[in-house]
């Protein structure tokens, strides 16, 4: 187990290194000039060159990257070009909001997706099954900004159950989590349905029935742990999808997380922030996958981590 | 027999709704099960025997299958009238069931203890520790060693035989009135089958349980049954006391069934196999179609921080044999003994060390093209005719495919050759345009045989090729294999776990245990005077289809075959084979 964790962490570090090189290179190749953004339209060419030298942006690519990497290894993500404050501080101050949103979204998609999937599998072929699967299809295919605006209109504007935007109470959390979760719920309900149908066909389910167990015991103790495995692996991958979704959803609901930070930074070519947010997201994805792999053996004893 | 029967089935009809409407799979079946007796329901696939057992348990796959008419009475209770809730209280408590597949019948994510205890707790109000005590008791009753420590184990940590014992323990923990065993030993090795049958008989004697045993194996019937029901196409063909059925079968079908059963001792009298008489036991001709010298196949297992190889599966350990033209050599042994891996190495499907020569050419010395050419001489027939034919290809194309791969003939020639092959294996050339699902299991195996013959190979490796077939079909396929051998002079490497079939078809026999050959000789040498204790055990374990010859006791080991997985550098000791006369080799 410790050997496994060690190996996985080394792998993770290599992945993050790769992500940092690729992102850095992409931002370097970008036609937009960050110095122009900082200096403003009326700046003289000398000022522009001055700033460029100050930021080290006149150096060749590999020198720039090497410098960034050395700083990164000592925990320094650099300073924002625009806001002039430490990127790490900016991210740390906004990370809790984003994590909270992500937890809310995972809770939503699991609650909705698994329930839909289980019900559909048990009532396979019925009208309920078909209705649920149409619902999941809509969930999967609806763009998040549309879902977000729709939920806002219905539950915030018309019904007034939840606030229109902002951050602070659990009421603020509901609509953004739901918006983010609907997509995942659609996926999960489909996965859970097919996984569950597969498990219900297994010989050990017949054994469970032959023992005279109650329906609930059969479903939740015998079928669910077997059926949920592929879904758990999916949650790890999902973290990556969330990172994309968060940028949209945080903007729609004015949620003060790193998604909004990233959005503002992209508009102003604030390279250190973009780099920082990308690396933090990559970290989250890598850790999410690692966590999913670590949890799996606790559910299925046949899985051994090597 | 005067007491009231414990279970009475009257005029039971079960139907299944399919695409072509409703079809009866059990028709008008009536029987009564007396207290303490063993009733065997015998039939080939599709006879409705399993549907009958599922109907009694109210476990029919719904909504497709249903009881159309008839009654099932357990004592005074009419089971067909019960709702699901009340039926649930009967299942596992008064009628228990064990199934064919011990490998998949236990839930992989729950411990043995959990699964045993929940069976007990579902029907009693015992406190946890009492249920636990009862679970240990049940495991002890089925002679599982170290019962208490097994409670914490998961199913995948136990062998097939041990899992089936756990299933039996689970079924008998609450001492049900009726135990339904649906092919309980079909998926088990023959020595394990012997042990499990013995165990079932002991437990029945101790508890007085009535047993319905569903099987296709006449040997098992002879071993276990008090009374027998023979079923075919959902109908009862014949019923009676086991002794009578075997001694004086009345229905034609019963006679056919009994005649088709391969029996040890019978194959030799027939003397039908190829040119059995012409061979000494160790043919040393240079024209051997296959020469295997000191074959090793090992699979690496990875572990540790850098995923280094730390253990190996020693699947095949220093196996040597040769096969002469037109000869049948059988490799027998139980699961995990390395017989299939040996076959795969010869067919070039797994990497190996050691020497394999086909037609005098050592494969290792040949280039890729040479190996491909040599491979033409070796073809394979696999166990499962349902899984070894691509469902999306026409069967004619499947049989022609080897010719296409080796670029033989043009399209018309190939067509003609395939048509001839179809006719030869007993199928009509008109069937060439059909797809595999339109054929029965036996027909599919014929297609596989035709495919193997397409390249006119010198050697056909038949890996458990008749194991999945019903006995009557099995007998016909075996006859076809023998005829083809006479006609084409092809040699067979016949891999099987079934001693009776092996005796029927072989010229020579090699017995494998844990990756090594422990005994090798002519068929008569091995079957008449087996020299190795393991060979004796294998032969002894085969149930004899003759109730009068029912063996008194089968020595039970209650232990497991050691593992073939070993640490790196810890190779198993090599067995030395000694000639005990006439080329009959036995491990010292």
Image (tube, coloured by chain):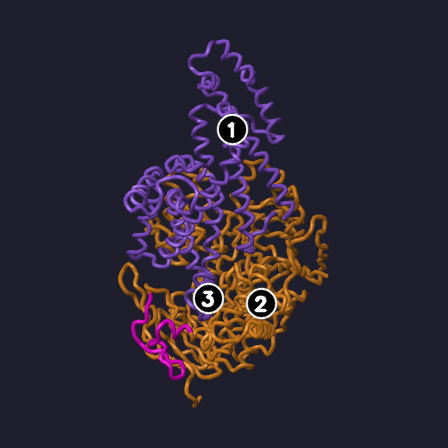
Circle 1 Cα neighbour tier, 10 Å, few/some/many (<14 / 14–19 / ≥20): many
- Which one is nearer the viewer's eye here, A26 or A284? A284
Upstream in sequence: badge 3 or badge 1:
3
Given residues B492 and B287, the one toward you in this image is B492
Vertical side of A190 occupied by B262: above or below: below
Q: Which mark is residue B192?
A: 2
Residue A300, visible in the rendered structure: yes
Q: Which residue is mark 3?
A: A208
**If the image is split into quadrants, where does the N terminus of chain B sit?**
bottom left
Q: Quadrant of residue A256?
A: top left
Q: The disc numbered 1 marks a residue on which chain?
A: A
Kind of element beneath mark 3: helix
Q: CA distance from mark 3 to mark 1?
A: 53 Å
Tell me where residue B164 appears, x and y as whole percent: 54, 67
Q: The C terminus of chain B appears in which quarter of the rendering?
A: bottom right
Residue situated in front as seen by the camera: A3 or B4: A3
Please report, as a chain letter, where disc 3 is located: A
In percent of the image, x 48 and y 59: which residue is there?
B466
Chain that the image shows in orange: B
| Mark 2–mark 3 distance (CA, rounded to whole Å) | 25 Å
Q: Is residue B66 magenta?
A: yes
Provide the chain ID for the residue under circle 2. Answer: B
Mark nearest the camera among 3 and 1 is 1
- Chain with purple colouring: A
Mark 1 — residue?
A: A275
The magenta span reads B65-88
State the SS at label 1: helix
């Amino acid at each position: 187990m410790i050997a496994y964790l060690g190996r996985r962490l080394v792998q993770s570090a290599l992945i993050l290194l790769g992500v940092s090189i690729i992102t850095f290179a992409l931002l370097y190749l970008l036609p937009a000039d960050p110095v122009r953004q900082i200096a403003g339209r009326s700046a003289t060419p000398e000022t522009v060159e001055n700033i460029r030298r100050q930021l080290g942006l006149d150096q060749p690519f590999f020198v720039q990257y090497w410098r960034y990497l050395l700083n990164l290894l000592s925990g320094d993500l650099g300073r924002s070009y625009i806001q002039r404050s430490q990127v790490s501080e900016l991210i740390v101050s906004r990370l809790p909001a984003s994590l909270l949103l992500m937890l809310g979204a995972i809770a939503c998609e699991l609650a909705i997706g698994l329930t839909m999937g289980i019900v559909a599998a048990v009532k396979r072929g019925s009208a309920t099954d078909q209705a649920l699967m149409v619902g999941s299809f809509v969930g999967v295919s609806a763009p998040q900004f549309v879902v977000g605006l729709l939920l806002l209109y219905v539950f915030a504007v018309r019904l007034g159950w939840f606030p229109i935007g902002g951050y602070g109470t659990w009421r603020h959390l509901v609509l953004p989590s739901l918006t983010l979760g609907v997509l995942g719920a659609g996926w999960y309900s489909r996965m859970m349905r097919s996984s569950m149908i597969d498990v219900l066909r297994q010989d050990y389910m017949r054994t469970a029935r032959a023992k005279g167990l109650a329906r609930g015991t059969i479903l939740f103790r015998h079928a669910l742990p077997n059926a949920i495995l592929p879904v758990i692996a999916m949650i790890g991958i999902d973290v990556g999808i969330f990172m994309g979704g968060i940028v949209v959803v945080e903007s729609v609901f004015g949620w003060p997380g790193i998604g909004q930070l990233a959005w503002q930074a992209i508009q102003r070519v604030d390279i250190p922030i973009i780099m920082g947010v990308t690396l933090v997201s990559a970290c989250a994805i890598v850790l999410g996958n690692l966590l999913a792999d670590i949890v799996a053996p606790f559910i299925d004893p046949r899985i051994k981590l090597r | 027999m005067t007491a009231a029967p414990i279970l009475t089935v009257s005029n039971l009809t079960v139907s299944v709704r399919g695409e072509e409407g409703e079809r009866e799979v059990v028709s008008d079946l009536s029987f009564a099960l007396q207290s303490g007796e063993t009733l065997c329901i015998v039939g080939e696939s599709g006879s409705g025997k399993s549907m009958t057992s599922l109907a009694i348990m109210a476990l029919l796959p719904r909504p497709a299958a249903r009881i159309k008419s008839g009654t099932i009475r357990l004592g005074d209770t009419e089971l067909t009238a019960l709702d699901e809730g009340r039926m649930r209280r009967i299942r596992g408590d008064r009628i228990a069931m064990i199934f064919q597949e011990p490998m998949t019948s236990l839930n992989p994510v729950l411990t043995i203890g959990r699964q045993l205890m929940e069976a007990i707790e579902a029907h009693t109000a015992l406190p946890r520790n009492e249920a636990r005590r009862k679970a240990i008791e049940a495991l002890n009753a089925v002679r599982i060693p170290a019962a208490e420590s097994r409670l914490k184990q998961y199913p995948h940590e136990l062998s097939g035989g041990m899992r089936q014992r756990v299933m039996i323990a689970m079924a008998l923990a609450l001492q049900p009135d009726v135990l339904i065993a649906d092919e309980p030993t079909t998926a088990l090795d023959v020595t394990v089958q012997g042990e499990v049958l013995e165990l079932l008989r002991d437990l029945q004697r101790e508890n007085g349980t009535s047993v319905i045993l569903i099987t296709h194996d006449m040997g098992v019937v002879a071993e276990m049954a008090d009374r027998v029901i023979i079923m075919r196409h959902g109908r009862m063909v014949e019923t009676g006391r086991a002794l009578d059925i075997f001694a004086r079968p009345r229905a034609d079908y019963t006679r056919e069934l009994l005649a088709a059963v391969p029996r040890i001792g019978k194959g030799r009298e027939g003397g039908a196999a190829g040119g059995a008489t012409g061979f000494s036991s160790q043919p040393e001709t240079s024209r051997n179609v296959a020469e295997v010298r000191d074959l090793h196949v090992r699979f690496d297992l990875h572990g540790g921080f850098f995923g280094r190889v730390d253990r190996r599966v020693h699947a095949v350990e220093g196996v040597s044999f040769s096969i002469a033209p037109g000869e049948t050599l059988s490799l027998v042994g139980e699961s995990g003994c390395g017989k299939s891996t040996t076959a795969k190495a010869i067919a070039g499907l797994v990497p190996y060390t050691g020497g394999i020569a086909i037609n005098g050419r050592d494969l290792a010395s040949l280039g890729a093209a040479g190996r491909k050419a040599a491979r033409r001489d070796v073809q394979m027939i696999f166990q499962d005719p349902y899984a070894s034919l691509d469902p999306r290809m026409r069967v004619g194309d499947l049989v022609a495919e080897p010719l296409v791969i080796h670029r033989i003939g043009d399209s018309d020639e190939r067509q003609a050759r395939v048509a001839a092959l179809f006719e030869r294996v007993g199928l009509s050339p008109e069937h060439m345009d059909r797809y595999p699902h339109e054929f029965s299991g036996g027909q599919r195996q014929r297609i596989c045989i035709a495919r193997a013959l397409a390249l006119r190979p010198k050697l056909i490796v038949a890996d458990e090729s008749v194991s999945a077939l019903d006995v009557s079909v099995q007998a016909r396929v075996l006859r076809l294999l023998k005829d083809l051998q006479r006609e084409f002079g092809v040699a067979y490497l016949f891999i099987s776990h079934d001693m009776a079939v092996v005796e029927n078809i072989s010229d020579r026999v090699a017995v494998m245990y844990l990756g090594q050959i422990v005994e090798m000789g002519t068929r008569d040498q091995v079957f008449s005077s087996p020299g190795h204790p393991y060979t004796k055990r294998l032969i002894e374990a085969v149930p004899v289809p003759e109730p009068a010859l029912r063996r008194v006791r089968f020595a039970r080991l209650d232990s497991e075959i050691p593992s073939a997985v070993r640490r790196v550098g810890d190779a198993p000791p090599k067995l030395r084979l000694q000639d005990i006369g006439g080329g009959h080799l036995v491990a010292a």
